[in-house]
Image (cartoon, helix red, strand yellow):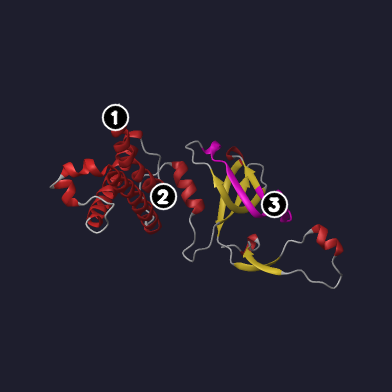
Amino acid sequence: MPGNAIAVAVLIAALAPGFCFVQTYRRHVLSDKPSPTREIIEFFSAGALATFVASVVVLALGSLVPWLISLHELVVDPRALRASAWHVVLSGGLVLLLSVTLCIVAGEVLGRRAPTRVGHVNAGVMSVRVLATRSPKGREPYLAVELNDGRLVEGYLRHAAIEDDPDRRDLVLQRPLFFSGTGYAERTPSAAVKLYVPGFMIRVIHISYPPVIVEPKDEDPVAGASASAGATSPRRKRWMPVPRSANK
């Protein structure tokens, strides 16, 4: 039983930091879902490297901090570890905490600096990457989604389904939202906060990067009814789309 507990503890110590690294890295870089074998290898590789670095740091601190084990105790006099079992536990906990921290920081840094790569990517992943990529100046993409019946809905991307089947690549758009009917219909703003668009209804998606313009702040209907006629509503800056004829 103690042997099994030790094995589980070693497995957690080896895989937990790698899991944190992979999850942090994938927040910034879209990629195909790996196989379970590849995923375990990624977890173990990143976790083992971080645990090694953390162990070296903790052992080096052991010669300065009394409640940590040192390299001398571990290599030259391992019998002394039995008399200081709590020091071993504290040192192991510090190694795990430090390795997890290293993996999170490394995943964040590498994920933010990862270049956009051209290569084999599944269709679902590719579509989300195109819809979510900002402009070189950091502007968010504004989507004009043309539906199968000719109507047009516009908004910023909130969620996108990564699916190989185009009919299942559903979208959720967020405000500011606009609707247009078929033909030369008037472009009408919507008071909705979010809009769900099923993938089977999507024909074409137009992507633009509108500039920053000044938008009147939404008026509270209760407060607006009691406000004086001469009062002016505050204004704020917000990403807003320019008319479709002016989008580039």
Mark found first going from the N terminus, 1 or 3: 1
Label for residue 24?
2
Q: Which amino acid, by three-letter code, is at mark 3? A: Phe
Label for residue 54?
none
- Judged left or right of residue 40, residue 71 is left
At a point 64% along the width and 60% down the height, the residue shown is: 244
Nearer to me, 2 or 224: 2
Q: Nearer the viewer, mark 2 or mark 3?
A: 2
Q: Which residues are magenta?
A: 166-194
Q: Residue furthest bottom?
A: 230
Q: Secondary structure at mark 1?
A: helix
Q: Which amino acid, by three-letter code, is at mark 2? A: Thr
Residue 139's spot in the image, x, y percent?
53, 63
Q: Which residue is mark 1?
A: 2
The CA distance from mark 2 to mark 3 is 36 Å
Residue 171's spot in the image, x, y percent?
58, 44
- Judged left or right of residue 46, residue 20 is right
| Image quadrant in which you'd find residue 242 | bottom right
Specify whether residue 42 is painted magenta. Answer: no
At a point 21% along the width and 52% down the height, the residue shown is: 70
Mark found first going from the N terminus, 1 or 2: 1
Circle 1 packing at 10 Å, graded few (<14), some (14-19), many (20+), is few
Q: Which amino acid, by three-letter code, is at mark 1? A: Pro
- Judged left or right of residue 201, residue 120 is left
Nearer to me, 103 or 133: 103
Q: Which residue is mark 3?
A: 179
Tell me whether the residue at label 2 lies in contact with that at label 3, contact meaning CB atoms closer than 8 angstroms. no
Mark found first going from the N terminus, 2 or 3: 2
The CA distance from mark 1 to mark 3 is 65 Å
Quadrant assignment for the N terminus = top left
Q: Nearer the viewer, mark 1 or mark 3?
A: 1
